Image: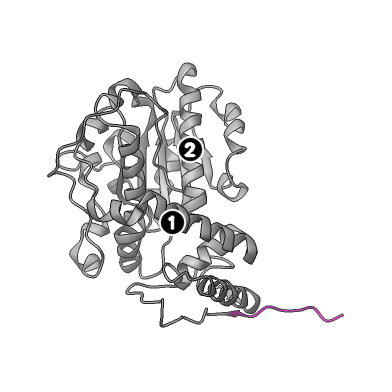
Amino acid sequence: MTEQINVIIEPKLDPKYDHYDFPITNPMTGSGHSGHVDAEQNAKLFQLRSELESEGYTERLDTLTLLRFLRARKFDVPLTKAMFIDTETWRREFEVDKIVSTFEYTEKPKVFEYYPQYYHKTDKDGRPVYIEQLGKIDLNAILAITTQERMIQNLVLEYERLADPRLPACSRKAGHLLETCCTIMDLKGVGVTSISTVYTFLKQVSAISQNYYPERLGKLYMINAPWGFASAFRVVKAFLDPVTVEKIHILGSGYQPELLQQVPAENLPVIFGGSCSCEGGCEMSDAGPWQEEQYTETAVKPTATTTATAPEPAPAAPEVVATATA
């Protein structure tokens, strides 16, 4: 019996949807990524787009987006189609486009006093670095400043900003396609009594990121993990895709040597053992290629977050949602 050999070919770009102004291939990525698509995968890409078009969908049908959804569902077209339609339904109901154009998180500096979560420069592969300090979370203090609804809206806004301008800018600077980020979750201060809260965060993040923003997590470093956390983390794995689990590194207080192998010291805040100390604080700087004009000239500029007054918070205290990307 003759063994079938799938030849790697470039996905055929569709001029109707594919209007990229940044690199669209990366020699270091694997099967199913742009530039690493075989004939069968390319056929499924065409099939998926054709079926979605026939049902009236006209947005987000570009090649890179559809390939991300296909990879998330192992190139099973019916499953991918269902995932894509669910995402479009959610985007419409949650008014994602309106959030991108109008949302202003004016309470951000105050919220960050109790829950720092921010993008800051890049890792050694050129990907955006995303940082959360989960151990500083004070739920009651946060809900005295903002509401769960606004926290979710900010979460969605940051996912959208990852897609544009952050990743395109990083791709331009690196000279090849980058579609994922490197996440650092600092668990310093997370005790046994608050571990369940951290689990709740991760569960909710997985629901939003995996369902609506697939294939965005490159690596996840959980640092300063408390005693027993690695064992307890098995509970979280039930809510995460196996591919995602493989990207997760759980490290104790001696995390710096391994973390610095992935994130250059000059890009890592001093608080984590790096040498970066941005004026006004790394957590508020949003420093990275997406702030450098030569890499963002054609990218969508971030929405301002310093002009509007935040609304009164709701009296209820629902679960908080974390913002790591996956």
Residue 271 at x, y percent in the picture: 29, 33
Q: Give the structural element (helix, strand or loop) at label 2.
A: helix
**Residue 310 appears left or right of 231:** left
Q: Nearer the viewer, residue 312 or 18?
A: 312
Q: Give me the residue at 36% from left, 37% from top.
A: 132
Marks 1 and 2, how far apart in space? 19 Å
Q: Give me the residue at 25% from left, 63% from top.
A: 300
**Residue 237 appears left or right of 13:** right
Residue 317 at x, y percent in the picture: 37, 23
**Residue 275 lies within the magenta run:** no
**Residue 3 lies within the magenta run:** yes
In which quadrant is the N terminus drawn? bottom right
Please say whether residue 287 is visible from this viewpoint: yes
Magenta residues, start to end = 1-8
Mark 1 vs mark 2: which is more N-terminal? 1
Q: Give the structural element (helix, strand or loop) at label 1.
A: loop
Magenta segment, principal secondary structure? loop
The residue singled out by tag 2 in the image is 204
Instruction: Please tell me the numbered disc located at residue 180.
Output: 1
**Number of on-image labels:** 2
Q: Amino acid at mark 2?
A: Gln
Please say whether residue 216 is visible from this viewpoint: no
Q: Nearer the viewer, residue 1 or 162?
A: 162
Q: Is residue 145 above or below residue 40?
A: above
**Residue 107 appears left or right of 220:** left
Residue 27 at x, y percent in the picture: 49, 70
